[in-house]
Amino acid sequence: GKTTSVAKLANLLTQNHKKVLVAAADTFRAAAIEQLDTWAQRLQIDIVKGSPKSDPAAVAFDAVQAAKARRC
């Protein structure tokens, strides 16, 4: 579903020579973090993730800061 769709979009963007960084902000479902991490490794893209049950908004904020720093 959602995680696979994110991976498909990330793959499309990387094929078009765009920098991609994904954020695993679904912190209440630990499997979602693991799934997105697996996809990020397969696609060789960066990922920002929080610990399980952490604040999703904090993960999103950290991802935006990381994207700015990495010029994604």
Image (cartoon, rainbow, N blue to C red):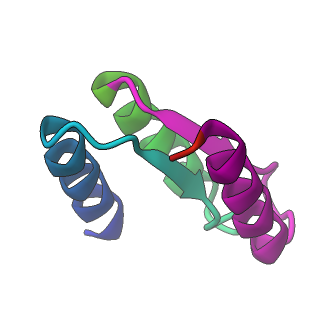
Looking at the image, which residue sits at the far bottom? 57
Q: How many marks?
A: 0
User: Where in the figure is residue 68, as x and y percent of width and height?
Assistant: 67, 52
Q: For this rendering, which residue is in front, 64 or 59?
A: 64
* 60, above or below 21, in the image: below
66 relative position to 55: left or right = left
Residue at horizontal 68 percent and vertical 55 percent from the top: 63
6 relative position to 67: left or right = left
* 6, above or below 13, in the image: below
Q: For this rendering, which residue is in front, 67 or 11?
A: 67
- Which of the 4 quarters of the picture holds residue 70? top right
Residue at horizontal 25 percent and vertical 69 percent from the top: 1
16 relative position to 64: left or right = left
Magenta-colored stretch includes residue 52: yes
* 59, above or below 7, in the image: below
User: Where in the figure is residue 7, as x and y percent of width and height?
Assistant: 28, 50
Residue numbers of the magenta segment? 44-70
User: Where in the figure is residue 34, as x and y percent of width and height?
Assistant: 53, 41
User: Where in the figure is residue 67, as x and y percent of width and height?
Assistant: 62, 50
Residue at horizontal 78 percent and vertical 51 percent from the top: 50
Magenta-colored stretch includes residue 47: yes
34 relative position to 53: left or right = left
Looking at the image, which residue sits at the far front? 71
* 51, above or below 43, in the image: below
